[in-house]
Image (tube, rainbow, N blue to C red):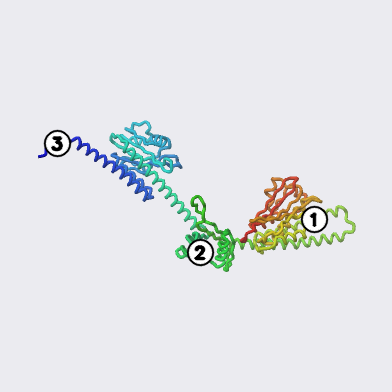
Amino acid sequence: MHKVQPIDTNLLAHNHNLTLEIQRRVDQLSAINTVAAVVSQSLDLNVTLQTALDAVLSVIDVEASGISLIDEQTNELVMRAQRGWKNDFVTTPMRIPMGHGMSGYVIAANEVIVTSDVSKDPRLIVPAVGEENIQAMAMAPMHARGKVIGILSVLSYEPYVFDEQEIAVLRAIADQVGLALDNARLYEATRSQQSRLHTVLQSTADAIISTDAQGTVNLINQAAERLFDLRSNQVIGQPLFTIALPIELRDGLAEAFAADMPGGFDVLLSSGRFLSAVISPVLVAFDGTPQQNGWVIVLQDISHIKEAERARLQFIQTAAHDLRNPLGVTLSALTMLQRSWKEPTATDREVFSIAMRGVNRMQDLIDDLLHLEKLESGVDFALIPFDIGELLQNAVQDFGPTLEQRNQQFLLQIAPLLPMVTGDARWLSRALANLLSNAHKYTPDGGLITLYAYADDESLTVAVQDNGAGIPPDAQARLFERFYRARHTENQVKGTGLGLAIVKSVMEKHHGRIEVQSAPGEGSLFKMILPLQPLDV
């Protein structure tokens, strides 16, 4: 017969307390996991806040909790959610200036702060919180991306002592919530930006079509739908070149994509409309390296601009024609007057010379204005491959007699086997003639003018250098403006002030550029730099 051992009540009590402690730890871990699960699945800011408050109150035996977030724009800590408080601090948010009160200590120390009898704590700066009669409070900083973004608080209306495990749970939940809130903020900001972008895309008057890297349409705005009589639900997901775009536009886009050189081009449709197209790559960074992820095509109806250009050109041509008639009459009258003079005085000759110079200058001005307007309007402007070497030789032959009048020397430094250039040979010839004419005017008698031509893999350079007086630095920035003439030359050298403006426009039409290098007393060097790849008008 076995003897019954007496029950050890101390052991039972110890086991019971251990069971309760284990259950408490399990509940704490469960609360942390609950918060982690919810915040990882929801990007709703309010859901995240309320879940965190419920979780922390389920494992810390206090009555209330709250979350305040830092508002970086106002530099304040703002109450965003609360549970169990007597007063409402969220509808009209409680705002505490950064660095002030108990929250200021939490953020500055970046640690959990525990206080008892909050109403008597000297760090309390919000009287309404004092009216809550809070006996104990713990405040934990919430972190995201290495910085404090807010504070998670728990509070008791009865005396309460927070143990280390509760503080650890509070800290863990605070950081979980901090990360979730940061993600929610980023999500809301992204949604807001997407909404604004959608509004801009749909309200702009420009037609916009975007594709992915394979050329499949993934966006078309309302302006594009109206312009081409399309419906977004019919074209999104379709290859770009299968949707009902005008054949002229499709050809232009196909040529641009085939050349792998998207940019801009203008196209005349069979309907009489002019469209301007700009194609831009969509770049996305992968491992720090930008990679093309699609295309954005912006189309603008510029028919009214082309009509305005035609009207402007027609007006200037008419005005030039109307001006030429009286100029012709004036020139004939002056010529007849000269022939009728038997013994003109010195004064007569001087007056006659002034009149002739004025008429000739007016004629040059009309011619240059017509050239500039024709160029900028694009009328009769064509880009085709041609031999730049032949153009240079022709320029040398045409310009030789002019140089001989002042005994100026002409030196050629033209590289052999220059590549073919895509451009308008007539306008490039005129631009070169303007540079040579300028060099002739500003180079002294017996001076030297040099014509250079050379190429590299990307561009061809045609340059004209003189050994004249040079150009002051303050004048160089305005050399290519219409009618601008440097002060030190305007009374010494004839000109309309349009020659270099024409050169600049010719270069812009060819997607090239004009550069100048000059210094007083050292002459000037003008460079026309032309790209060698095929161009779009």
The alpha-carbon separation of the residues under discs 3 and 1 comes to 131 Å
The residue wearing badge 2 is 240
Task: Locate residue 301: give its quadrant.
Answer: bottom right
Indicate left or right for 479 with 330 as reference.
left
Secondary structure at badge 2 equals helix
Indicate left or right for 41 with 409 as reference.
left
Residue at x 22% of width, y 38% of height: 15
Kindly report which numbered mark, 2 or 3, lies closer to the viewer in this rendering. 3
Q: Position of residue 490 (x, y in %)?
A: 75, 49
Q: Residues within 10 Å of mark 3 (few under 14, many from 20)?
A: few
Kind of residue at disc 1? Leu
- Camera-side residue: 69 or 402? 402
Residue at x 87% of width, y 61% of height: 340
- Viewer can see residue 49: yes
Mark linked to residue 243: none
- Viewer can see residue 133: no
* 394 w.r.t. 48: above or below: below
Tell which circle, 2 or 3, labels the residue nearer the N-terminal end. Answer: 3
Kind of residue at disc 3? Pro
Secondary structure at badge 1 equals helix
Kindly report which numbered mark, 3 or 1, lies closer to the viewer in this rendering. 3
Tell which circle, 2 or 1, labels the residue nearer the N-terminal end. Answer: 2
Q: The C terminus appears in which quarter of the rendering?
A: bottom right
The residue wearing badge 3 is 6
Indicate left or right for 14 with 331 as reference.
left
The alpha-carbon separation of the residues under discs 2 and 3 comes to 89 Å
Q: Position of residue 446 (x, y in %)?
A: 81, 51
Secondary structure at badge 3 equals loop
The residue wearing badge 1 is 403
